[in-house]
Amino acid sequence: MILSDFPAVTVLVPCFNEESTISSTIESLLSLNYPKDKLEILIIDDGSTDQTLSVAKKFEIESNVRVYHKENGGKFTALNFGLDLTRTEFVGCLDADSFVHPDALKNLMPYFTDPKTMAVTPSLKIYNPNSSVIRMIQNVEYNLGIFVRKISSLLNAIYVTPGPFSIFRMQVYRDLGRYHHAHNTEDMEMALRMQSHHYRIVNAHKAVVYTVGPKTLPKLYKQRVRWTHGFLENIKDYRHLILNPKYGNLGLLILPLAFVSFFATLYLVLVSYYGLVRIIIKDVIQIQTVGFHPAWQSLHFSWFFVNTATLSIINVLIAFLTLIIIFAGKRLAGVKDRRVMDLVYSFFLYSFIAPLWLTKAFYNSLFSRRTPWR
Amino acid sequence: MADWKKYLITLGITAVIFLTAIYLNNYFNNKRLENIQAIQNSIATDIASSEVQYTLLGDLSCKSVNDSILSPELNNLASRIQYGEQNIGNTDSNIIQLKRDYSLLEIKDYLLMKQIDQRCKIPSAFILYFYSNNQCDDCTRQGYVLDTLKQQYPALRIYSFDYNLDLSAIKTLITINKLSGTLPALVIDDKVYYGFNSIEDIQRYMPILKTLSSSSTSATSTATSSKKK
C-alpha cells in the first residue's frame, strides 16, 4: 500500500525519568520520512525528578515539537493529558525508551485508507540486542511476536495495541473514552475495549519500532510480572469476551488459548522441574552407592533407545514450528538478522526464567496485590 | 463473527497431527518388541547350538567353547527389556512374555556354563540376583553395584530374576536356594545374602574375583607399588 497524501498525525511521548533515552527517541521521530508539517510531536513530562524536562526542552526549537510538564500521575494520565491537546485526526504514542525506524510512519499510515480500520500496530524489535544475554533472549521472543501479531491481525484478534507507536483515529477516544489505569497495562485495556465494541485493529508489519528491553534479569522479571498480572486482571475485566461467538476468533480462540496457555505453561514447567529433581536424586544415590564411574565403555548408540513417546514427537514438532515462526517474524519485518546463538540461549534459559514471573503474577492476581510501574 | 467451518478444519488438522504422533509411537514400540524377540530367538539358537556342541564333543569341547559371546548378548537383551518396561509398561503382556523367555534363557545359560566350568576345571564366578520392581529401594542400589561389577569384571556372570515373575523355573530356583522372600537376594557359591551388599561386600564373598581379569583402568586400591623397606 502506498500513500497518496499524508494525513496529519500527532505523536505523544510520555516520559518519567528518562534523561538518557529521551533525546534519541525524539531524534528518531524527527528523522521520520514524513512531511514535517503533517507531524506533531508532544512531549509530556510526568513529573520527572531528573533532567528529562530540560533535555526535552532543547528540542522545542523544532517547529513541530512542544514540551509540557505535569505532576506525576502515571503513564495513562500523561497520555490523557496529551490527548486533550491533540488537534489532528490521528494520534499515537511513543514510549521514551523506544525509537522508530525512519519509514515506520510511512509504512503504517496506508492501512488507514480502509475507513473501518481504527488502530494500527507496528512490528516491535529489541534495540541493540547484543548488549546482554537477557536482551538476546527477548529479541528472539519479539521476532516471534512480529509473526504472531500479523496472524492475529489477519484473524481480527489483536488484543494489545503496544505502547510504542500504535496509531489510533482520534474518533476512538471520542467514542470510547480516555485511558484508564488498567493495572499498569493500559495498552492492553484499550485494545480489549476497542474489540468489545467491534473496532478494527490491524498490524503494519513493515512499520518497525525498536524498544530498549530490560538489560538485567531483575528488571525483566519486574516488567513481565507487570505484563502478566495486567493480562490476568484485564481478562477478568473483559471476561464477557471469552467464549462469546459475537467476538469471533478473539473470543472463541485467541483469548481462551492465551488464558489456558498461561496455566499450561506453569503446569508443564512444574512437571519438568519435578522430573529434573528426580533424575538428580537418582544420580546422587548412584554416586553414593558405587562412586563416580562414568560408564564410557557402555555408551554405544542404538536406534532402539531413541525416545519416540507421543509427547516427545509432539514436542519436537512444536519446537520446529516455533523456529519457523521466529524466522517468519524476522522476514516479515524485513530486517536482516542472521543470528542463531540467541535461539540457543532462549530455548534453554527462557524455560527456567519465565516460570518465575508467571508464578508471581498469578500470586498477585490471586491475592489482589498492586504491581508498581517502575 | 464465528466461522465454524474454519474451526472444524483447524480441529481436524490438529487431530491429524496428534493421531500421527500416537500412531508413530505405537509403530516404534511394536518395532522394539520385534527387535527384542529377534534377539531372543538368536540367543536361544546359540545356546541350543552350544549344548549340542558340548554333548557331541565331550571332553574336547573345553578348547572350543567360547564363553565371551553369550554374555554381552544377554546384557544387550536385558537393557532393551528394561527400556521396554519403562516406556511400554511393565504390565504389558508382550513385555511380560519377553521377560519370561529371557529368564529361561538366563537359566539355560547358567546351567550350561556351570557344566562347562565343572568339566573343564575353570574357576567359576556366578551371581544369582533376585529383585522386585515394587517398593524395593535397595534393589535399585543393588542394581548399580552389580552393573559396576559387571563393567569391572567382564568374566563375572550375573543372572537377575524378577522374584514376582510368573515362571515355574524361577519358582524352582527360589525353592532350591530356599529363599525367604527378603529382597534383594544374592546367591553366591550356594550361599544366600539378603539385603543390600556393596561392591566391597561382594568382593569379600567372592575371592575368585581377584583372579578374574579386570577391565578397570582407573586405579582402585590394589597396592602393587611401594615396597616397605
Image: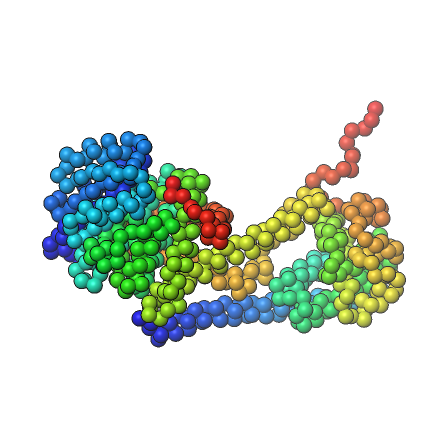
Query: Given the current orientation, which residue lies at the most extreme top position?
Result: B229
* Image coordinates for residue B191, horizontal then vertical, percent: 88, 55
Q: Is residue A200 above or below residue A343?
A: below
| Residue A332 relative to residue A350: left or right | left
Residue A173 visible somewhere in the drawing: yes
Which quadrant of the structure image shows residue B49? bottom right
Q: Is residue A139 above or below residue B34?
A: above
Residue situated in front as seen by the camera: A243 or B9: A243
Which quadrant of the structure image shows residue A216? top left
| Residue A212 relative to residue B213: left or right | left
Q: Is residue A140 above or below residue A130?
A: below
Q: Residue at x 62, y 69 (%)?
A: B33
* Image coordinates for residue A191, horizontal then vertical, percent: 31, 57
Q: Residue at x 42, y 40 (%)?
A: A219
Counting every numbered tag in the picture gives 0
Residue situated in front as seen by the camera: A264 or B103: A264
* Image coordinates for residue A82, horizontal then vertical, percent: 22, 45
| Residue A110 relative to residue B213: left or right | left
Q: Residue at x 73, y 46 (%)?
A: A289
Residue B47 visible somewhere in the drawing: no
Q: Residue at x 76, y 37 (%)?
A: B221
Q: Quadrant of the N terminus of chain A?
A: bottom left
* Image coordinates for residue A344, horizontal then vertical, percent: 44, 48
Q: Quadrant of the C terminus of chain A?
A: top left
Residue situated in front as seen by the camera: B122 or B15: B15
Way the structure is coloured: rainbow
